[in-house]
Amino acid sequence: MRAQRVVIVAGGCAAILGTGWLVAPRDLPTVTTTGGGAGAGAATFDGPAIQNPRGVFQVEIVVKGGKVTEVRPLQAGTGDAESRFINSEALPALQKRILDAQTWDVQYVSGASFTSPGIVESAKGAFKKAGLG
């Protein structure tokens, strides 16, 4: 009876992990404003690498004409399935918030307790390097 429970629990865990692995994004997303992007007159500024219990977080911003046109995640925590799943929602939301507000000082994403402060702190450093605050 005990061995049967172990097999059932192990099988359930494998199914959950396998599903998480399948639905997890493979690439870090980049959000760009319309007509922006790197190119002539654009400069990139990387923020510091922020370490927390869920890994290292770091972003790069692209500035053109004094405006942030892209926010690119360079590092986004660990590669485990849970982090990848959370980041698939949190990274695009944080990137959009930073672009829309044109500041690093944005609201965190609910449920992204490690991703949000890591990305925001790195963005803060990138904005400072760019002379934007």
Image: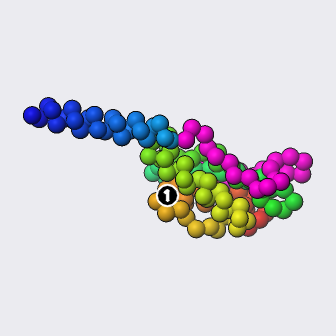
Q: Visible in this render: residue 50?
A: no
Viewer-proximal residue among 84 and 126: 84
Looking at the image, which residue is at 55% across and 59% down? 116
The picture places residue 7, in percent across and down from the top left corner, at 21, 32
Q: Which residues are magenta?
A: 25-49
Magenta stretch: dominant SS?
A: loop
Looking at the image, which residue is at 19% across and 35% down? 6
The picture places residue 71, in percent across and down from the top left corner, at 70, 53
Three-letter amino acid code of the residue under disc 1: Ala
The answer to if 97 sits in the magenta stretch is no
Single out the residue that lies furthest toward the right: 40
- Residue at mark 1: 112
The answer to if 38 sits in the magenta stretch is yes
The picture places residue 34, in percent across and down from the top left corner, at 79, 55
Viewer-proximal residue among 114 and 1: 1
The answer to whether 107 is drawn above or below residue 81 in the figure is below
Question: Which secondary structure lies at badge 1?
Answer: loop
